[in-house]
Image (cartoon, grey):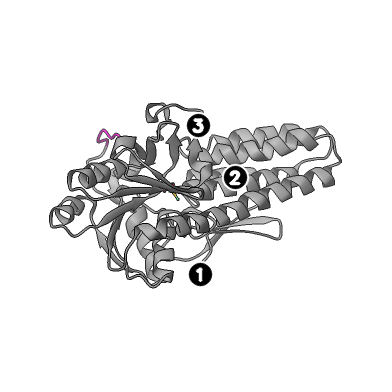
Amino acid sequence: MVNLKFRTLEWKNDTLLLLDQRKLPNIVTDVACTTPEQTAEAIRNLTVRGAPAIGVAAAYGLLLAVDLSASGPQVLTDLEKAALLLGSARPTAVNLQWAVDRMMGIAAIYHDLNAADLREHLSEEAVAIHEEDMAMCRKIGEHGAPLLADGMTVLTHCNAGALATSGIGTALSVIYTAQAQRKRIKVYVDETRPVLQGARLTMWELMQQRIDATLITDSTAASLFGAGKIDAVIVGADRIAANGDVANKIGTYNVAVLAAHHGVPFYVAAPRSTFDKKIATGAEIPIEERSPAEVTGVGAARTAPTSAKVFSPAFDVTPHRLITAIVSDRGVQTGGR
Ligand code: MRU
């Protein structure tokens, strides 16, 4: 049993509370969302981030749209407007549109009911999306933990932990579950430039959960592989194409190439909401480009010359041939390596 020392999001008193991930690890505080616009903005500005977490947040964002809407035919129009806004807040993680589509599927079935009954159905669906996410995280841990033996050292990139989901995480769920089974696991954490999800978020949550974690710069990974200090890599995913190509945080592909070169297993952990059977290969996955400001400085300090030209994709695609296995809530699928 894995017990978390914090929670990423919560629906309380008809308000969506989000742990503000922009401020971690220095300040632990919530942002309260009471409108779909605030929820979409919180997704865009990374108050809440990580593929499963933004899906759950968007589901509650649609519930907020119903609460604010006048009753009658206006409800469906308002929901459609909010669905467009929330679904387009970030393009790469398919979980976002998956959750919006589930909510709108319920709206399509029940929109003729009175406002209170429609709200009840949408509320049940949002809670189901939330609870299923928590359950899928637990299952990923159960399926993945046997891949980690006592004494192993694992490398992870970005944050695919509890902070990226509404449960115990995906990649980190495997580590938490292995630890709960009394295996001693050490973790190297890539800092994950430019937004530092590894340094700020993964380190914070692993330390909260008392995992033996060591922070490294992204460029340190190769020398650790070379020195034989990494036994396995485990990362999350934002979208998995039908052929098994995986989009995840920028830099994941680098790590996969390093792992293949050094004969180290490379595992991806993701719930079923991350699989996109509608697209054939990773080449079709839309890759978000973020503001140059995330690259031209560190925090508030500017590090690049003013008006430096920047290219800042937030994600890359790791080809299926570099992946040893994909761990999902359904089990472990062998990859192409
Ligand atoms: O830009 P972010 O912080 O939302 O990127 C998150 C990641 O790339 C995670 O690895 C991914 O969403 C998997 S989360 C379980």
Q: What's the CA distance linking mark 2 and mark 1?
A: 28 Å
| Residue numbers of the magenta segment | 307-313
Is any atom of residue 300 visible in this view? no
Is the shortest distance between ligand 1 and the CB of mark 3 under 8 Å?
A: no
Question: Magenta includes 311?
Answer: yes
> Which mark's residue is nearer the viewer, 3 or 2?
3
Q: What's the CA distance linking mark 3 and mark 2?
A: 21 Å
* Amino acid type at mark 2: Ala
Crowding at mark 2 (Cα within 10 Å: few <14, some 14-19, many 20+): many
Look at mark 2 in the image and give the residue it sits on: 58
Asked which quadrant contains residue 260, the reply is: top left
Residue 71 in the image: x percent, y percent? 83, 39
Is residue 192 toward the left or the right of residue 113 in the image? Answer: left
The tag on residue 1 is 1
Residue 229 in the image: x percent, y percent? 19, 60
> Which mark's residue is nearer the viewer, 2 or 1?
1
* Amino acid type at mark 3: Lys
Question: SS of the residue at dot 2?
Answer: helix
Closer to the camera in the image, 59 or 306: 59
* Residue drawn at x 63%, y 36% as measured from the top left: 101
Answer with mark 2 or mark 1, whichever residue precedes in sequence. Answer: 1
In the image, farthest residue toward the right: 114
Look at mark 3 in the image and give the residue it sits on: 277
* Amino acid type at mark 1: Met
Crowding at mark 1 (Cα within 10 Å: few <14, some 14-19, many 20+): few
Q: Is residue 239 above or below residue 183?
A: above
Contact? badges 3 and 2 (CB < 8 Å): no
Asked which quadrant contains residue 191, the reply is: bottom left
